[in-house]
């Protein structure tokens, strides 16, 4: 039997019982909609998770420290180098920058400073932690809704402060910690563009020792330094409610400087004490932050840095289990979403069995005219597949609409709660194709029994049927 004849005959048979076949097709559509809705929710949540962490810099950042550390090598870190530990200095920084996949390398700056507003008549100073912020942090989600603007350049004498610290500068009551409450427009205007004085401790290297000094003393003088009190005039250019991710958080950082400018200040940091007890090192870094161009390159860059003799840590190391959790979530949602489609397949079986009882005489005539058992099976398979294809297309459209409505309703609720709307429903093209294909396969499987039963009909008994 030709394909055209099969399709034409199946279409005619489906039109003869429009209501029953439509309800069966609708049942398949509801089952596919349930499957698509479940999976699109899991995929949307995973995409939202990856998007948020990707913008924060978590997935493309590597935290590098020296193995020459009082804590020793962390558990799980392979000791690839049996020689003396490498020092995290300018040479190491340059070698990291030469790795092809690396976008930027900057120090993990964290120091303490004392701030005061010159125009404040009370002359109250505010002691806090100062950190460095690279230019790439401009794309962080922390700056989606902040007051002011980003640094004009990496060497500008400018500062971005947290809202909590801004309240302290204005002498306002503090909000509960991690409340993420913005300053009012008036409060922000009282700070933005204003000058603030930063007092800090500068690490100042000693002058070279005289030539008459013995070698041990010369080495000690080269590695030692003085701590000098300094002041700097900074301009407040921005106010954020949450601290942007800078590689690692060292306490509660409330003031952020451009990394280039912060390095030029040569501020005293806690790890600088190691220079006193480890002579002969010169300038070193407590830690370096390595940013890669794409998150998929993190593992390769980590391996390259480890081979140079340094410790590394990235969120990719800790998120492998989380990625597996999303796979299990998608599998769980897919299984439960498929249950409705399995139930709908019973409707196909019922519809086609009823069609056999109603068309016994027709089947007998076809067999008497030379139709084979295979031809009869093909007719019922085409009917089942047609209902599966139509139901699958309807289900995908219905599932997409359900997702859009739920996403819209959720965002309306989030807006009323003063939260940022998000898109957590995602229907990729492969899910559309998979939904329709799965619907057709389930329908064909459901048509196995009715097709086999129709093919086994005795034409003589079928022709006697009234």
Image (tube, helix red, strand yellow):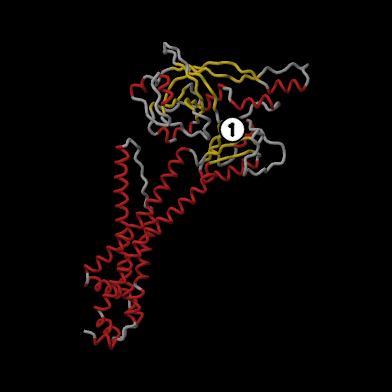
Residue 332 at what x, y percent from top left? 42, 56
Q: Secondary structure at mark 1?
A: loop
| Horizontal side, residue 220 vs residue 428: left or right | right
Q: Quadrant of the C terminus?
A: bottom left
Residue 440 at what x, y percent from top left? 35, 66
> From what the image shows, is residue 440 above or below residue 298?
below
Residue 341 at what x, y percent from top left? 34, 63
- What residue sits 30% from the left and 52% below the top? 402
Q: Quadrant of the N terminus?
A: bottom left
Quarter-wise, where is residue 452 in the image? bottom left
- What residue sits 37% from the left and 32% below the top? 145
Residue 29 at what x, y percent from top left? 30, 61
Quarter-wise, where is residue 304 in the image? top right
Farthest residue in the bottom direction? 460
> From what the image shows, is residue 163 above or below residue 96?
above
Farthest residue in the top direction? 121
Q: Which residue is mark 1?
A: 287
> From what the image shows, is residue 60 above or below residue 171?
below
Q: How many marks?
A: 1
| Horizontal side, residue 359 vs residue 447: left or right | left
> From what the image shows, is residue 300 above or below residue 18?
above
Considering depth in this image, is 144 or 273 the residue closer to the camera?
A: 273
| Horizontal side, residue 284 vs residue 234: left or right | right
Label 1 crowd (10 A; few <14 / some 14-19 / many >=20): many
């Amino acid at each position: 039997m030709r394909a055209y004849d099969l399709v034409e005959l199946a279409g005619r048979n489906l039109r003869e019982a429009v209501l029953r076949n439509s309800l069966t097709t609708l049942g398949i559509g509801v089952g596919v909609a349930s499957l698509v809705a479940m999976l699109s929710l899991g995929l949307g949540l995973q995409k939202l998770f990856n998007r948020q962490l990707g913008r924060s810099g978590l997935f493309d950042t590597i935290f590098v420290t020296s193995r020459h550390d009082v804590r020793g090598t962390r558990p799980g870190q392979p000791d690839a180098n049996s020689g003396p530990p490498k020092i995290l200095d300018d040479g190491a920084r340059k070698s990291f920058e030469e790795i092809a996949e690396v976008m930027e390398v900057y120090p993990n700056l964290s120091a303490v400073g004392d701030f005061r507003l010159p125009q404040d008549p009370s002359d109250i100073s505010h002691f806090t932690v100062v950190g460095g912020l690279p230019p790439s942090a401009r794309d962080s989600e922390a700056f989606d809704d902040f007051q002011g603007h980003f640094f004009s350049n990496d060497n500008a004498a400018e500062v971005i402060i947290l809202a909590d610290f801004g309240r302290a500068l204005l002498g306002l009551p503090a909000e509960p910690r991690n409340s993420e409450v913005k300053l009012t427009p008036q409060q922000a205007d009282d700070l933005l563009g204003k000058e603030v004085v930063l007092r800090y401790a500068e690490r100042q290297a000693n002058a070279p020792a005289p030539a008459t000094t013995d070698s041990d003393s010369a080495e000690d003088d080269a590695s030692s330094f003085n701590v000098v009190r300094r002041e700097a005039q900074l301009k407040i250019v921005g106010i954020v409610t949450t601290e942007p991710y800078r590689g690692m958080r060292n306490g509660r950082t409330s003031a952020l400087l451009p990394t280039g400018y912060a390095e030029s200040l040569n501020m005293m940091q806690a790890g600088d004490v190691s220079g006193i007890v480890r002579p002969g090192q010169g300038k070193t870094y407590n830690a370096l932050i390595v940013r890669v161009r794409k998150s998929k390159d993190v593992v390769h860059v980590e391996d390259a840095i480890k081979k140079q003799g340094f410790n590394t840590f990235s969120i990719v190391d800790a998120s492998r289990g989380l990625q597996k959790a999303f796979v299990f979530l998608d599998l769980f949602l897919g299984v439960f979403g498929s249950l409705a489609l399995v139930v709908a397949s019973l409707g196909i079986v019922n519809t086609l069995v009823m069609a056999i009882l109603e068309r016994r005489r027709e089947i007998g005539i076809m067999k008497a005219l030379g139709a084979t058992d295979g031809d009869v099976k093909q007719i019922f398979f085409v009917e089942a597949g047609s209902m599966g294809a139509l139901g699958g297309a309807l289900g995908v459209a219905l599932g997409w609409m359900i997702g859009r409505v739920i996403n819209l309703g959720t965002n309306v609720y989030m807006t009323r709660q003063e939260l940022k709307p998000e898109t957590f429903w995602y229907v990729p093209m492969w899910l559309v194709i998979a939904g329709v294909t799965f619907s057709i396969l389930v329908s064909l499987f459901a048509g196995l029994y009715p097709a086999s039963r129709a093919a086994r009909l005795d034409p003589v008994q079928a022709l006697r049927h009234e």
